[in-house]
Image (cartoon, rainbow, N blue to C red):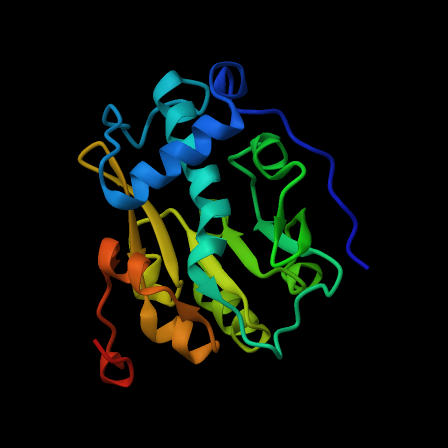
Amino acid sequence: MALLAPRPSAPRGASRWIGRPALCALAGLAISGQLHLEPVEASSAAGTGERSAEYAVKVALLFKLALFIEWPASDDGDPDAFVIGVLGEDPFGPLLEEVVAGEAIGGLPVRILRGKDLEPLLASRILFISRSESQRVEEVVAGSRDHGILTVGDARGFCERGGMVNLLVDSGRVGVELNRFEADRAGLQINSKLIQLARDVPTRDRGAVGG
């Protein structure tokens, strides 16, 4: 059985200036494209205010995604909890716990799991694949595909490499990219509202997904 990893430190300043209701409101704005952040350079330190703002919104988006996804009845998720997994280095810190504290999805309490190995995280229904795992995205995607897991990342080219949802900062906006083909292969159904608001990433097998 996978054990809960210790909660890492939060991005400096993030949890002090923004609460859970505000985070969820920001996530809604981000999904609708109405949220604008100051541009975040790739070389920015993780402790800067811009970086903290970026990941504060992304952690709320990670939670809100569950409202737009229908999982197959045969998924391998934990039957007693809705598990959100983080594979690799965790950019969120305890913000994830703060956002999901006391929340339930589909009648199940939300649980956070972190790890560097995929197998203990296969009980997840949402799996965030950190940038630290960029060298093995295809391997992780292939290993999780038959378990009904929504794979999420935040690196350019993530959806093109088989990830399902990519949270990106583009011109100062936190946006959502979708690989509907991979979601369909895993038996996941994406709500039409998210499809309308996200950018659909074409794949070579695009013809297998309508729309």
Is residue 153 shown left or right of residue 159? Answer: right
Q: Residue at x 26, y 55 (%)?
A: 198
Q: Is residue 3 above or below residue 76?
A: above
Answer yes or no: is residue 56 visible: yes
Identify which residue, 132 or 108, lies in the foreground.
108
Identify which residue, 108 or 128, lies in the foreground.
108
Q: Residue at x 69, y 33 (%)?
A: 7
Q: Is residue 123 above or below residue 128?
A: below
Q: Position of residue 206 (x, y in %)?
A: 24, 79
Identify which residue, 135 or 172, lies in the foreground.
172
Q: Is residue 11 above or below residue 115?
A: above
Q: Quadrant of residue 2?
A: bottom right
Q: Residue at x 42, y 39 (%)?
A: 58
Hey, which residue is sitting farthest bottom in the picture? 208
Hey, which residue is sitting farthest right in the picture? 1
Is residue 183 shown left or right of residue 177? Answer: right
Identify which residue, 135 or 197, lies in the foreground.
197
- Give the quarter of the figure containing the N terminus: bottom right
Q: Position of residue 61 (x, y in %)?
A: 42, 43
Q: Residue at x 52, y 29 (%)?
A: 20
Q: Position of residue 99 (x, y in %)?
A: 56, 35
